[in-house]
Amino acid sequence: MRVFVAGATGAIGKQLVPRLVAAGHEVHGMTRSESKQAMLDELGAVPVVADALDPGQVAQAVARAEPEVIVHQLTALGAIDLRHFGRAFAPTNRLRTEGTDHLLSAGQAVGVRRFVAQSNGAFPYARTGGAVKGEEDPLDPAPAREMRAMVAAIRHLEEAVLGAGWTEGVVLRYGALYGPGTSLAPGQAQFELVREGKFPLVGGGVWSFIHTADAAEATVAAAEHGSRGVYNIVDDDPAPVAEWLPALAQMLGAQRPVPAPRLAAGEAGAVLMTEIRGASNAKAKRELGWRLAHPSWRQGFAP
Ligand SMILES: NC(=O)c1ccc[n+]([C@@H]2O[C@H](COP(=O)([O-])OP(=O)(O)OC[C@H]3O[C@@H](n4cnc5c(N)ncnc54)[C@H](OP(=O)(O)O)[C@@H]3O)[C@@H](O)[C@H]2O)c1
């Protein structure tokens, strides 16, 4: 297949492009930077320079590539500052709203038969009911103020992709990503906060993680044979913060984190540490034939 990857140079993109190429697909990888074309070339993709927020550039890039499948992996998160969560997500929200709309329009113009988009299964499920959510469970109907725009952007992306009747719209709700290229990796921001004991709010919020390599494997399967719908792309081991944070601190040789007042983490930080729910990967395993190399963060986090 000819596959157009928007976000080809990112944490997932860098793992995804070589896997698509190895599976025999012709990959066109999008970046804003002339300077990243060589990297894309090395990964095995045809480099395409375009800004995802410019509808004309996106339309031209997609028309030139004439893909059968588009994979949308556009985000702009960097290392998220939990105290300024709303501000940290603003550029990503634009990519999930305007960026999605531009890619869908461009894809419709060339008649792509499948459109696979990155969503999130780690943060936005409703904070009521069971600890581990399936794809049919509702997203948070009343998110915390700092998280409202993020959830709204995710809803926009999902509704636009699933509602595109002219293509097979596939939404991948990834868990909290860790591994190469993310801030949850040795030497990177979040791991270092844990190492320095500055990630101290221990609580009962349940996290579902996913290694970038496993996220990429699932994405290849979804691009090849995903059906219209939502798939949670998370590991087998959803765990409360009170379990994974001390375990990670121990792995990193840090002091055991102690509970801190909710205010210390900011509004969104408190929600993430004490209230969020995890997700189940049963559907993705069953329907995509996906097998994880890192079924649990317990092994995956280890340096
Ligand atoms: N579910 C999750 O937990 C989740 C999801 C996503 C990210 N993250 C975390 O966020 C960190 C890295 O993510 P990141 O958001 O900084 O992403 P990233 O890994 O740097 O990837 C972002 C991709 O989007 C592209 N992009 C962004 N804006 C664009 C634009 N206007 N036009 C065209 N392409 C654009 C970038 O391309 P160019 O820069 O080459 O133009 C790049 O390929 C990691 O810590 C990761 O764990 C977590």
Image (cartoon, rainbow, N blue to C red):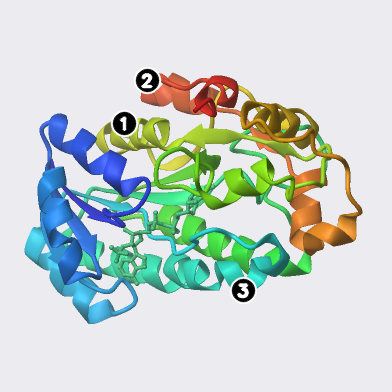
| Residue 297, picture quadrant | top right
Marks 1 & 3, CB-CB < 8 Å contact: no
Query: What residue is shown at x 16% (from left), y 53% (from top)?
Result: 40
Say whether residue 62 is left or right of residue 271: left
Query: What residue is shown at x 69% (from left), y 64% (from top)?
Result: 147
Per the image, the residue denoted by label 1 is 221
**SS category of the residue bearing label 2:** loop
Tell me if mark 1 has few (under 14), some (14-19) or many (20+) residues whose alpha carbon lies within 10 angstroms of its own.
some
* Position of residue 1 measured from the top left corner of the image (x, y, whole percent): 12, 40
Say whether residue 279 is left or right of residue 146: left
Q: Is 225 rendered above or below residue 104?
A: above
Residue 55's mark? none
Say whether residue 52 is left or right of residue 249: left
* Position of residue 112 measured from the top left corner of the image (x, y, whole percent): 21, 53
- Disc with the residue nearer the chain's start (1 vs 3): 3
Marks 2 & 1, CB-CB < 8 Å contact: yes
Quadrant assignment for ligand 1: bottom left
**SS category of the residue bearing label 3:** helix
Q: Is 76 rendered above or below residue 207?
A: below
* Position of residue 262 measured from the top left corner of the image (x, y, whole percent): 88, 55
Per the image, the residue denoted by label 3 is 87
Is ligand 1 closer than 8 angstroms to the Cβ of mark 1? no
Q: Is any part of residue 183 visible from this angle?
A: yes
